Amino acid sequence: MEIIIQPDSRQASQIAARIVARLVREKPHAVLGMATGKTPLQLYRDLVLMHRESGLDFGGITSFNLDEYVGTPPAHPSSLHSYMWAHLFSHINMPRERINIPDGLTADIPAACRKYEQAVRSAGGIDVQILGIGTNGHIGYNEPSSSLSSRTRIKTLTEESRLDAAAAFGGEEGVPTHVITMGLGTIMESKMCLLLAFGKKKARAVALTVEGPVTAMVPGSILQMHPRAILVLDKDAASELKMADYYTWVHDHKPDWQKY
Ligand code: F6R
Protein backbone atom coordinates (compact mmCIF):
# COMPACT_ATOMS: atom_id res chain seq x y z
CA MET A 1 0.00 0.00 0.00
CA GLU A 2 1.15 3.50 -0.68
CA ILE A 3 0.16 5.94 2.05
CA ILE A 4 0.26 9.65 1.21
CA ILE A 5 -0.35 12.02 4.12
CA GLN A 6 -1.10 15.66 3.36
CA PRO A 7 -1.69 18.62 5.70
CA ASP A 8 -5.34 18.98 4.63
CA SER A 9 -8.05 17.50 2.43
CA ARG A 10 -7.54 20.16 -0.25
CA GLN A 11 -3.96 19.17 -0.89
CA ALA A 12 -4.80 15.48 -0.61
CA SER A 13 -7.60 15.90 -3.19
CA GLN A 14 -5.18 17.73 -5.51
CA ILE A 15 -2.87 14.71 -5.54
CA ALA A 16 -5.78 12.37 -6.23
CA ALA A 17 -6.94 14.68 -9.05
CA ARG A 18 -3.44 14.63 -10.57
CA ILE A 19 -3.41 10.81 -10.49
CA VAL A 20 -6.80 10.62 -12.23
CA ALA A 21 -5.94 13.39 -14.71
CA ARG A 22 -2.68 11.70 -15.68
CA LEU A 23 -4.56 8.48 -16.46
CA VAL A 24 -7.18 10.38 -18.50
CA ARG A 25 -4.40 12.06 -20.52
CA GLU A 26 -2.34 8.92 -21.02
CA LYS A 27 -5.28 6.62 -21.73
CA PRO A 28 -8.13 8.54 -23.40
CA HIS A 29 -10.38 5.44 -23.28
CA ALA A 30 -9.72 4.70 -19.62
CA VAL A 31 -12.35 3.29 -17.28
CA LEU A 32 -12.91 5.15 -14.01
CA GLY A 33 -14.62 3.75 -10.93
CA MET A 34 -16.54 6.45 -9.09
CA ALA A 35 -17.49 6.88 -5.44
CA THR A 36 -20.01 9.24 -3.86
CA GLY A 37 -20.18 10.85 -0.40
CA LYS A 38 -18.49 13.90 1.07
CA THR A 39 -14.93 12.67 0.60
CA PRO A 40 -14.50 12.89 -3.21
CA LEU A 41 -16.28 16.26 -3.57
CA GLN A 42 -13.07 18.29 -3.77
CA LEU A 43 -11.50 15.75 -6.14
CA TYR A 44 -14.51 16.15 -8.47
CA ARG A 45 -14.29 19.96 -8.20
CA ASP A 46 -10.61 19.76 -9.15
CA LEU A 47 -11.35 17.52 -12.15
CA VAL A 48 -14.09 19.89 -13.34
CA LEU A 49 -11.60 22.78 -13.07
CA MET A 50 -8.98 20.84 -15.05
CA HIS A 51 -11.61 20.15 -17.72
CA ARG A 52 -12.62 23.82 -17.90
CA GLU A 53 -9.23 25.43 -17.62
CA SER A 54 -6.85 23.01 -19.27
CA GLY A 55 -9.19 21.03 -21.49
CA LEU A 56 -8.91 17.70 -19.66
CA ASP A 57 -10.89 15.55 -22.09
CA PHE A 58 -13.35 12.97 -20.78
CA GLY A 59 -14.85 12.33 -24.25
CA GLY A 60 -13.56 8.74 -24.43
CA ILE A 61 -13.78 7.85 -20.75
CA THR A 62 -16.18 5.24 -19.35
CA SER A 63 -17.28 5.23 -15.72
CA PHE A 64 -18.81 2.77 -13.29
CA ASN A 65 -20.18 3.91 -9.96
CA LEU A 66 -19.79 1.76 -6.89
CA ASP A 67 -23.32 1.84 -5.61
CA GLU A 68 -26.93 3.07 -5.56
CA TYR A 69 -29.77 2.94 -3.02
CA VAL A 70 -32.44 0.31 -3.72
CA GLY A 71 -35.87 1.81 -4.39
CA THR A 72 -34.51 5.32 -4.94
CA PRO A 73 -35.38 6.77 -8.35
CA PRO A 74 -32.43 8.28 -10.24
CA ALA A 75 -34.10 11.71 -10.12
CA HIS A 76 -34.48 11.64 -6.32
CA PRO A 77 -32.31 14.48 -4.95
CA SER A 78 -30.46 12.09 -2.61
CA SER A 79 -29.90 9.30 -5.13
CA LEU A 80 -26.29 8.57 -5.98
CA HIS A 81 -27.26 9.24 -9.63
CA SER A 82 -28.25 12.81 -8.70
CA TYR A 83 -25.06 13.25 -6.71
CA MET A 84 -22.88 12.27 -9.69
CA TRP A 85 -24.67 14.56 -12.12
CA ALA A 86 -24.64 17.46 -9.67
CA HIS A 87 -20.96 17.19 -8.79
CA LEU A 88 -19.29 15.80 -11.91
CA PHE A 89 -21.13 14.56 -14.96
CA SER A 90 -23.02 17.79 -15.73
CA HIS A 91 -19.73 19.68 -15.77
CA ILE A 92 -17.48 17.50 -17.94
CA ASN A 93 -17.76 16.00 -21.43
CA MET A 94 -18.20 12.34 -20.53
CA PRO A 95 -20.77 10.88 -22.96
CA ARG A 96 -23.98 9.84 -21.19
CA GLU A 97 -23.89 6.37 -22.76
CA ARG A 98 -20.54 5.63 -21.14
CA ILE A 99 -21.78 6.44 -17.62
CA ASN A 100 -22.81 3.39 -15.59
CA ILE A 101 -24.52 3.55 -12.19
CA PRO A 102 -26.37 0.59 -10.62
CA ASP A 103 -30.13 0.83 -11.14
CA GLY A 104 -31.82 1.07 -7.76
CA LEU A 105 -35.25 0.53 -9.33
CA THR A 106 -34.52 -2.67 -11.22
CA ALA A 107 -37.20 -5.36 -10.91
CA ASP A 108 -34.60 -8.15 -11.02
CA ILE A 109 -31.68 -7.23 -8.78
CA PRO A 110 -29.56 -10.41 -9.26
CA ALA A 111 -29.85 -10.14 -13.06
CA ALA A 112 -29.01 -6.41 -12.98
CA CYS A 113 -25.95 -7.13 -10.81
CA ARG A 114 -24.73 -9.84 -13.19
CA LYS A 115 -25.20 -7.42 -16.09
CA TYR A 116 -23.24 -4.74 -14.26
CA GLU A 117 -20.32 -7.12 -13.67
CA GLN A 118 -20.43 -8.12 -17.33
CA ALA A 119 -20.40 -4.46 -18.41
CA VAL A 120 -17.28 -3.80 -16.29
CA ARG A 121 -15.58 -6.79 -17.93
CA SER A 122 -16.66 -5.75 -21.45
CA ALA A 123 -15.25 -2.27 -20.87
CA GLY A 124 -11.87 -3.88 -20.16
CA GLY A 125 -11.97 -3.56 -16.36
CA ILE A 126 -11.59 -0.51 -14.16
CA ASP A 127 -8.29 1.40 -14.44
CA VAL A 128 -8.66 3.51 -11.30
CA GLN A 129 -11.29 2.88 -8.65
CA ILE A 130 -11.90 5.96 -6.50
CA LEU A 131 -12.90 4.99 -2.94
CA GLY A 132 -13.94 6.62 0.30
CA ILE A 133 -14.20 4.67 3.54
CA GLY A 134 -16.99 4.42 6.10
CA THR A 135 -16.40 4.99 9.79
CA ASN A 136 -16.93 1.21 10.13
CA GLY A 137 -14.34 0.42 7.46
CA HIS A 138 -16.75 -0.22 4.57
CA ILE A 139 -15.65 0.46 1.00
CA GLY A 140 -18.40 0.77 -1.56
CA TYR A 141 -21.27 -0.37 0.66
CA ASN A 142 -19.51 -3.59 1.58
CA GLU A 143 -20.37 -3.49 5.24
CA PRO A 144 -18.38 -5.39 7.90
CA SER A 145 -18.78 -9.16 7.43
CA SER A 146 -18.99 -8.79 3.62
CA SER A 147 -17.30 -11.63 1.76
CA LEU A 148 -13.80 -10.59 0.75
CA SER A 149 -14.48 -11.99 -2.72
CA SER A 150 -18.02 -10.62 -3.12
CA ARG A 151 -19.35 -9.33 -6.45
CA THR A 152 -21.97 -6.68 -7.27
CA ARG A 153 -25.06 -7.51 -5.21
CA ILE A 154 -27.67 -6.19 -2.79
CA LYS A 155 -26.48 -5.32 0.73
CA THR A 156 -28.30 -4.20 3.86
CA LEU A 157 -26.95 -0.97 5.31
CA THR A 158 -25.75 -0.98 8.90
CA GLU A 159 -27.25 1.39 11.45
CA GLU A 160 -23.97 3.35 11.37
CA SER A 161 -24.12 3.85 7.59
CA ARG A 162 -27.80 4.83 7.74
CA LEU A 163 -27.00 7.41 10.41
CA ASP A 164 -24.15 8.77 8.26
CA ALA A 165 -26.61 9.19 5.36
CA ALA A 166 -29.47 10.57 7.51
CA ALA A 167 -28.91 14.25 6.73
CA ALA A 168 -29.34 13.65 2.97
CA PHE A 169 -32.69 11.88 3.53
CA GLY A 170 -34.18 14.24 6.11
CA GLY A 171 -33.55 11.86 9.04
CA GLU A 172 -32.65 8.21 9.56
CA GLU A 173 -36.21 6.94 8.88
CA GLY A 174 -35.92 8.24 5.31
CA VAL A 175 -32.66 6.42 4.53
CA PRO A 176 -33.13 3.34 2.34
CA THR A 177 -32.31 0.06 4.06
CA HIS A 178 -30.66 -1.59 1.05
CA VAL A 179 -28.14 -0.74 -1.63
CA ILE A 180 -26.71 -2.34 -4.73
CA THR A 181 -22.93 -2.24 -4.42
CA MET A 182 -19.95 -3.54 -6.31
CA GLY A 183 -18.34 -6.30 -4.28
CA LEU A 184 -14.91 -6.44 -2.71
CA GLY A 185 -13.89 -8.94 -5.39
CA THR A 186 -15.05 -6.49 -8.07
CA ILE A 187 -13.12 -3.61 -6.48
CA MET A 188 -10.00 -5.77 -6.12
CA GLU A 189 -9.93 -6.41 -9.87
CA SER A 190 -9.42 -2.68 -10.57
CA LYS A 191 -5.92 -1.96 -11.81
CA MET A 192 -5.48 0.75 -9.19
CA CYS A 193 -7.45 1.60 -6.05
CA LEU A 194 -7.31 5.23 -4.93
CA LEU A 195 -8.80 5.65 -1.47
CA LEU A 196 -9.30 9.06 0.08
CA ALA A 197 -10.04 9.65 3.77
CA PHE A 198 -10.31 12.90 5.66
CA GLY A 199 -10.99 13.89 9.24
CA LYS A 200 -10.58 12.40 12.72
CA LYS A 201 -13.79 10.41 12.30
CA LYS A 202 -12.00 8.19 9.77
CA ALA A 203 -8.75 7.74 11.74
CA ARG A 204 -9.66 4.41 13.33
CA ALA A 205 -11.04 2.88 10.11
CA VAL A 206 -7.87 4.01 8.29
CA ALA A 207 -5.54 2.58 10.96
CA LEU A 208 -7.37 -0.77 10.92
CA THR A 209 -7.37 -0.81 7.11
CA VAL A 210 -3.64 -0.17 6.82
CA GLU A 211 -2.10 -1.67 9.93
CA GLY A 212 -4.65 -4.19 11.17
CA PRO A 213 -5.21 -7.74 9.99
CA VAL A 214 -7.02 -8.44 6.73
CA THR A 215 -10.53 -9.20 7.89
CA ALA A 216 -14.09 -9.08 6.60
CA MET A 217 -14.88 -7.06 9.73
CA VAL A 218 -12.86 -4.17 8.24
CA PRO A 219 -13.68 -4.47 4.52
CA GLY A 220 -11.12 -1.80 3.53
CA SER A 221 -8.34 -4.05 4.88
CA ILE A 222 -8.67 -6.23 1.75
CA LEU A 223 -6.74 -3.44 -0.01
CA GLN A 224 -3.60 -4.78 1.70
CA MET A 225 -3.84 -7.58 -0.88
CA HIS A 226 -4.09 -5.14 -3.83
CA PRO A 227 -0.90 -4.69 -5.86
CA ARG A 228 -1.58 -0.97 -6.42
CA ALA A 229 -3.58 0.64 -3.62
CA ILE A 230 -2.90 4.32 -2.91
CA LEU A 231 -4.39 5.94 0.18
CA VAL A 232 -4.43 9.73 0.21
CA LEU A 233 -5.12 11.05 3.71
CA ASP A 234 -5.22 14.31 5.56
CA LYS A 235 -3.34 14.59 8.85
CA ASP A 236 -6.44 13.87 10.95
CA ALA A 237 -7.38 10.69 9.10
CA ALA A 238 -3.74 9.54 9.46
CA SER A 239 -3.57 10.38 13.17
CA GLU A 240 -3.90 6.78 14.43
CA LEU A 241 -1.33 5.27 12.06
CA LYS A 242 1.64 3.89 13.99
CA MET A 243 4.02 4.17 11.04
CA ALA A 244 2.90 7.62 9.82
CA ASP A 245 6.45 9.02 10.00
CA TYR A 246 7.74 6.23 7.78
CA TYR A 247 4.97 6.75 5.19
CA THR A 248 5.73 10.48 5.10
CA TRP A 249 9.46 9.83 4.73
CA VAL A 250 8.82 7.42 1.85
CA HIS A 251 6.63 9.99 0.09
CA ASP A 252 9.14 12.82 0.60
CA HIS A 253 12.00 10.74 -0.80
CA LYS A 254 10.35 9.42 -3.93
CA PRO A 255 12.49 9.64 -7.03
CA ASP A 256 11.21 12.29 -9.47
CA TRP A 257 9.80 9.72 -11.91
CA GLN A 258 7.58 8.31 -9.15
CA LYS A 259 6.10 11.64 -8.09
CA TYR A 260 2.49 12.65 -8.76
C1 F6R B 1 -20.21 5.75 -1.60
C2 F6R B 1 -19.26 4.82 -1.01
C3 F6R B 1 -19.01 4.80 0.46
C4 F6R B 1 -18.43 6.13 0.96
C5 F6R B 1 -18.20 6.10 2.46
C6 F6R B 1 -17.64 7.40 2.98
O1 F6R B 1 -20.26 5.60 -3.01
O2 F6R B 1 -18.68 4.06 -1.73
O3 F6R B 1 -18.11 3.78 0.77
O4 F6R B 1 -17.22 6.37 0.28
O5 F6R B 1 -19.41 5.82 3.11
O6 F6R B 1 -18.58 8.41 2.85
P1 F6R B 1 -18.20 9.93 3.11
O7 F6R B 1 -17.23 10.30 2.05
O8 F6R B 1 -19.48 10.70 2.97
O9 F6R B 1 -17.60 10.01 4.46
Image (cartoon, grey):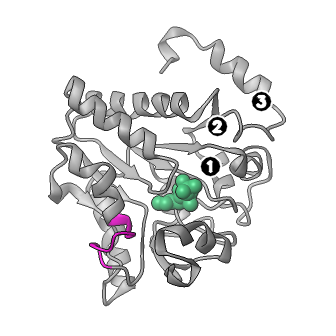
In the rendered view, tell whether residue 169 sits above or below residue 251: below
Per the rendering, the mark at residue 41 is: none
Residue shown at the point (49%, 56%) measured from the top left = 37
- Tag 1 and tag 2, C-beta contact below 8 Å: yes
Specify which label sits upstream in the sequence, 3 or 2: 2
Residue shown at the point (22%, 45%) measured from the top left = 91
Q: Is residue 191 visible?
A: no
What SS does tag 2 mark? loop
Per the rendering, the mark at residue 244 is: 3
The magenta-colored residue range is 73-81
Specify which label sits upstream in the sequence, 1 or 2: 2
To which residue does mark 1 refer? 223
What SS does tag 1 mark? helix
- The overriding secondary structure of the stretch rendered in magenta is loop
To which residue does mark 2 refer? 1
- Tag 3 and tag 2, C-beta contact below 8 Å: no
Q: Nearer the viewer, residue 193 or 121?
A: 193
CA distance separating discs 1 and 2: 8 Å
Q: Residues within 10 Å of mark 2 (few under 14, many from 20)?
A: some
